[in-house]
Image (cartoon, helix red, strand yellow):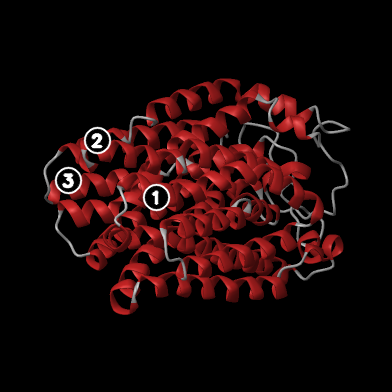
Amino acid sequence: MELHTTAAGPADHDTAVPVRALTGSPPGRRRIYPWVVFALAFGLLLADYMSRQVLSAIFPFLKTEWLLSDSQLASLTSVVALMVGLLTLPLSMVADRWGRTRSLVLMAVLWSAATLLCAVAVSYEQMLGARFLVGVGEAAYGSVGIAVVLSVFAPRVHAALGGAFMAGGSFGSVLGVALGGVIAVQLGWRWSFATMAVFGLILALLFRVVVTEAKLDRYATDPVSGGPSGVDTTRAPVSTLFTNPAVLCAYIGSGLQIFTAAVLLSWMPSFFNRHYDLAPDKAGLVASVVVLFVGAGMVGCGFLTDRVGRADMSRKWTTAIVFCLTSLLCLTIGFGLGTGPAQLILIGIGAFFSGGSSGPTAAMVANLTHPSVRASAFGTLTLANSLLGLALGPFVVGVLADHIGLTAALRLAPLPYLLAIAAFVVGKRVYPAGLRRLAALEPTGPR
């Protein structure tokens, strides 16, 4: 968490103190273990979203078998995001105190078990209850997981890593939709849920064995210098998560910019099934390409943001604005066209930038909050993403689709970008003041 907005200086590079002297770990091992943590946390995020989004590939089967409306189908998706939104902050605060790694493992076991319940549901009500439990299990995984990942990496790569980690949601959605559709056609839709559940349980066991609180403490990265750090016993008040205007702008902008990306994740299989006359399995595969663009954009835009913001951290706000504007234009025009290559190209470009601001906002939250409440800060970010985007987006489009048709509803989906852009513009203006507020939390001032 840097306390400056100027060019990267010595604080952004390796310290002169030998790594072994500070951590007791060889330099080579110190470089490898953070990536092991990232890989396992990323894998669990894949499992998280595979369990969450496999439902999108099952929509046509449930609509036919249980005679469900689009609003009912949307509720099965939105109830997960709603529970994530309601529980992510309190559970993230618990994880900050009880132990982040133990919390992550417990969450993974819970959502995987709930996904198994989806496989045996025999009615809409039972499926809704099982999806409710999936949301409870997944509630704080994203916030706690990204806090764990960023704690062992230097601030100069936080936007790239934040974008890459959050892109796991898109990649997991790709796998969930694509594999879910194929498995449903070949073996039945219940096996789609069962497969995702088993994958999550295996990864939870592996994470439990490899990642521990003690190891994370040894490999922790100092939030200011970017070098090795010991265990920080200083705790910031929880109120600091809400009293910094710049952080509030990051929360709100992030939630609003993920609205449209969430719509694409949930409704593209149905869009291709209804308007391109593709069978459910083929519609899921084609939609997975669009979702893949969403994930690739999060990674690519994150790397671009770190590059642009290397000399001036405030430029990360500017990149977030540009990404939102690009997606707004491409998707609005794309869904306004008739079926064909031009529409697919514009939708693909819009999808690439639809979640591109996730990396910049994650970096801003990490950069503007104290390490002792970092998981809680990302819990607040996840709360905004869930309530303003992941829960609201698919449900609103489902309700609109019942009245004006799916394509017309999708044409309106990019409009929340206008509000996201406004939040990022304000955030950039108050960013310097936000850094000064954070510096005031340090007992001896900025180091």
Q: Are marks 3 and 2 in contact (CB under 8 Å)?
A: no
Inter-mark Cα distance, 1 to 2: 32 Å
Which residue matches tag 3? 343
Could you tell me how many numbered marks the image carries? Answer: 3
Tell me if label 1 and label 3 are in contact, CB under 8 Å.
no
According to the image, label 1 marks what residue? 297
Alpha carbons under labels 1 and 3: distance apart:
19 Å
Q: CA distance from mark 3 to mark 2?
A: 23 Å
Name the mark nearer the viewer: 3 or 2. Answer: 2
| Disc number lying in front (1 or 2) | 2
Are there few (<14), some (14-19), or many (20+) residues within 10 Å of tag 2? few
Q: Give the mark nearest the N terminus, 3 or 2.
A: 3
The amino acid beneath tag 2 is His
Which residue type carries mark 3? Gln
Residue found at x 80% / y 62%: 218
Determine whether label 1 and label 2 are within 8 Å by CB.
no
Task: Determine the residue positioned at 61% across, 57% down.
Answer: 137
Q: Which residue is mark 2?
A: 403
Q: Nearer the viewer, residue 166 or 77?
A: 77
Secondary structure beneath dot 2 equals helix
Q: Is residue 403 visible?
A: yes
